[in-house]
C-alpha cells in the first residue's frame, strides 16, 4: 500500500483528491494538511511514502514544504501538484527535492499512475512544463535581488524596503535596478510581474 499525504489549502479540492485516490486499491491517504507548515508537521507524524503538495498555500508554500519534508522524513518522496505551470517553479521544486511536478488539469488516472511511478523511484514531469523550463533557462535573479524585488511587490518605498531588509537605500536601488535589467522590464512593477510569470519569485 502506498501511503500518501495530501497538502492543499482548498478543502473541496483536497477532499476530491482524497476521494479519487481512495478508489485506488494500492493507495491510502494517511494525512491531510491545509498549508505547508501543517504538511511538514503531519508528514513528520504519519511518515508517508508520498507527499502530494500544492504550490500556492498560505504561509509556508508547497516549495518550502517540499524542502522541509525531504529534510525531516527520510524516504518520503515529494510530488508537486499545481495550477501554475511556471518554468521557474519547476526548477525550484527539483532543487527542493521534488520527484514530480504535475499540473492540476491532468486526468485523475494520470495522478494515480504518477504516484505509482514516483513510489517506484521515477521522476515524473509534465512534458509541456519541462519543455518550457528548458527554453526559459535558469532564474537570472540572485537571492538578494529576488528578496528585494519581492519586498517591492506591495508598492513599498525604497526607504521602507531598506529598513525592513536592513540595507542602505543605495543598495536597495542597485538590487532593484539589476532585477529590472535582468527581467527586461521598464520599472519595478513590471519586473515583479515578469518574475512572477516565470516563477522566479
Image (cartoon, rainbow, N blue to C red):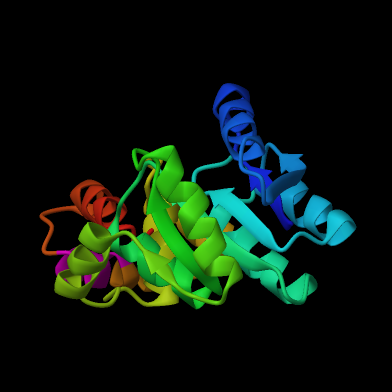
Task: Name the residue: 42% across, 60% down.
Answer: 101
Task: Name the residue: 33% across, 71% down.
Answer: 175
Query: Residue 132 appears at what percent x and percent y?
Result: 19, 64
Task: Name the residue: 81% across, 51% down.
Answer: 42
Direction from residue 181 to residue 142 in the image, left or right? right
In the depicted view, which residue is nearer to us: 194 or 160?
194
The quarter in which the C terminus is drawn is bottom left
Q: Is residue 21 magenta?
A: no
The quarter in which the N terminus is drawn is bottom right
In the depicted view, which residue is nearer to us: 66 or 153?
66
Magenta segment boundaries in residue numbering: 176-183
Q: Is residue 182 magenta?
A: yes
Direction from residue 24 to residue 148 in the image, left or right? left
Query: Residue 66 appears at what percent x and percent y?
Result: 61, 63
Query: Residue 137 appears at what percent x and percent y?
Result: 21, 76
Q: Is residue 156 visible?
A: no
Q: Is residue 51 visible?
A: yes
Direction from residue 92 to residue 187 in the image, left or right? left
Amino acid at each position: 500500500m502506498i501511503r500518501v499525504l495530501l497538502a492543499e489549502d482548498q478543502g473541496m479540492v483536497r477532499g476530491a483528491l482524497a476521494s479519487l485516490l481512495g478508489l485506488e486499491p494500492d493507495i491510502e491517504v494517511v494525512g491531510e494538511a491545509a498549508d505547508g507548515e501543517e504538511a511538514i508537521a503531519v508528514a513528520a507524524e504519519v511518515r508517508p511514502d508520498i507527499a502530494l503538495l500544492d504550490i500556492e498555500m498560505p504561509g509556508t508554500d508547497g516549495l518550502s514544504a517540499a524542502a522541509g519534508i525531504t529534510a525531516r522524513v527520510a524516504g518520503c518522496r515529494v510530488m508537486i501538484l499545481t495550477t501554475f505551470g511556471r518554468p521557474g517553479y519547476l526548477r525550484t521544486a527539483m532543487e527542493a527535492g521534488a520527484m514530480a511536478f504535475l499540473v492540476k488539469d491532468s486526468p485523475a488516472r494520470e495522478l494515480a499512475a504518477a504516484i505509482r511511478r514516483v513510489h517506484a523511484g521515477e521522476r515524473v514531469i509534465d512534458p509541456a512544463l519541462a519543455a518550457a523550463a528548458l527554453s526559459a533557462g535558469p532564474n537570472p535573479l540572485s537571492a538578494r535581488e529576488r528578496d528585494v524585488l519581492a519586498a517591492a511587490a506591495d508598492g513599498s518605498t525604497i526607504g521602507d524596503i531598506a529598513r525592513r531588509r536592513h540595507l542602505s537605500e543605495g543598495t536597495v536601488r542597485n538590487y532593484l535596478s539589476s532585477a529590472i535589467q535582468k527581467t527586461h522590464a521598464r520599472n519595478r512593477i513590471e519586473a515583479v510581474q515578469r518574475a512572477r510569470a516565470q516563477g522566479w519569485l
